[in-house]
């Protein structure tokens, strides 16, 4: 008699399923781009969701030329400041930090996040003239004190890559933005695609049924119904990692690829619903509308990056938006 087979319960795509080390996501890879030098990432704060009507411009679509209702996530993206330029050199062990050059006009609250070097000057690039620079990145920080809906003042700090052009052009661009503000328009344009990285909602310690979606055991089962039937065979003499078990659920760093930027706006009052966003309030700074959902709860820091797997033969032109809902979300 053949054994009955079924798919394994739960996703094995991520492991270990433990809490993220930081609410500020860490990026390990950056795509190579062409064109003029620019920053390849940005960050904002999740305000909430609403919906918009856009005109379908896909020629072969059955709804071509018609209005479509799409869900959008609102991210408030005030300008970021560039605190330092970090140079990388290529070694037999991969990219290694060659040195950093820090700006002078830093936010005093930045010292609550890290130890800011005391001896730094804008003119200290000269000591790296002999270094074979392989990559140029900047250390940027957010300005949450400009955001009305986020109850904190201490900046979130992160590293952003400078892409495009030659190494000399990237270095010149980095020198130009050191100590200055950069906006979302310096990173992306309406209609483009980005990767969205954030830490998901934390759900605490959960059982195997909620965590992996396994079936409830029979009501005649001894002692419990929401456990796992068995945790594996006698051999090997350990519990395999594929066995669904209870543990931490949520608060994991996740990346969603190829999210379309529906709109980039300057006045947040345009899309703030009546009564403000639930648990957030009013959007008062520059904002972006991202097609679909975004990981994390309201107020969570969300990082944007140039797409690493950019879709081919897809239009990146700005969308024709006919309506954005500003109806109150208080009763939702």
Image (cartoon, helix red, strand yellow):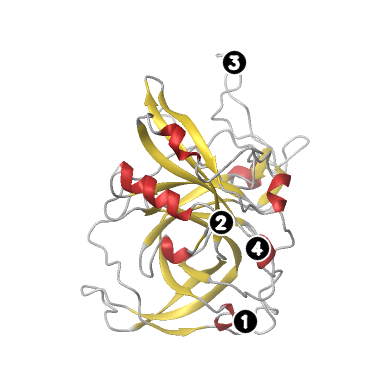
> x, y percentage for residue 171?
38, 45
* Label 3 environment density (alpha carbons within 10 Å; few <14, some 14–19, many ≥20): few
Residue 323 at what x, y percent from top left? 46, 85
Residue denoted by label 1: 273
Whether residues under marks 2 and 4 lie with C-beta atoms below 8 angstroms apart, the answer is no
Cα separation, mark 1 vs mark 3, equals 59 Å
Residue 161 visible in the shown view: yes
Q: Nearer the viewer, residue 308 or 55?
A: 308
Work out whether residue 327 or residue 185 is closer to the camera in this orientation and state it: 185
Residue at (63, 44) in percent of width and height: 211
C-alpha gap between disc 4 and disc 1: 15 Å
* Label 2 element class: strand
Q: Are marks 3 and 2 in contact (CB under 8 Å)?
A: no
Callout 1: 10 Å neighbours few (<14), some, many (20+)? Answer: many
Q: Secondary structure at mark 4?
A: loop
**Mark 1 or mark 2, which is nearer the start of the sequence?**
2
- Which residue corresponds to the image point at 27% horizontal and 67% vertical from the top-left? 315
- Whether residues under marks 1 and 3 lie with C-beta atoms below 8 angstroms apart, the answer is no
Mark 3 or mark 4, earlier in chain: 3
Q: Which residue is mark 2?
A: 81
Nearer the observer: mark 3 or 4; the answer is 4
């Amino acid at each position: 008699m053949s054994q009955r087979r079924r798919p394994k319960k739960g996703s094995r795509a991520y492991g270990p399923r433990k809490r993220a080390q930081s609410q500020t996501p860490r990026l390990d890879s950056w795509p190579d781009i062409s064109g003029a030098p620019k920053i390849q990432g940005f960050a904002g704060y999740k305000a909430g969701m609403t919906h918009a009507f856009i005109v379908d411009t896909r020629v072969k679509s059955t709804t071509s030329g018609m209005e479509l209702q799409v869900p959008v996530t609102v991210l408030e993206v005030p300008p970021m400041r560039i605190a330092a330029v970090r140079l990388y050199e290529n070694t037999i062990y991969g990219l290694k930090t060659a040195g950093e050059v820090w700006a002078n006009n830093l936010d005093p609250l930045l010292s609550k996040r890290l130890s800011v070097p005391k001896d730094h000057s804008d003119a200290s690039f000269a000591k790296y003239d002999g270094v074979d620079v392989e990559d140029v990145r900047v250390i940027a920080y957010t300005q949450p004190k400009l955001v009305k809906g986020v109850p904190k003042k201490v900046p979130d700090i992160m590293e952003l890559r400078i892409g495009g052009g030659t190494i000399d052009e990237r270095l010149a661009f980095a020198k130009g933005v050191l100590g200055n503000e950069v906006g979302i328009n310096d990173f992306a344009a309406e209609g483009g695609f980005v990767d969205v990285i954030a830490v998901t909602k934390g759900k605490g310690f959960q059982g195997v049924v909620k965590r992996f979606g396994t079936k409830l055991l029979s009501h005649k089962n001894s002692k419990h119904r929401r456990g796992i039937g068995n945790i594996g065979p006698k051999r090997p003499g350990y519990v395999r990692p594929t066995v669904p078990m209870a543990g931490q659920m949520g608060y994991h760093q996740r990346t969603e690829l190829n999210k379309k930027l529906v709109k980039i706006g300057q006045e947040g009052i345009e899309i703030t619903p009546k009564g403000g966003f639930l648990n957030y309030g009013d959007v008062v700074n520059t904002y972006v509308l991202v097609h679909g959902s975004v990981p994390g709860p309201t107020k969570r820091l969300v990082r944007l990056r140039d797409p690493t797997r950019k879709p081919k033969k897809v239009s990146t032109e700005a969308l024709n938006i006919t309506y954005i809902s500003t109806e109150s979300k208080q009763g939702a």
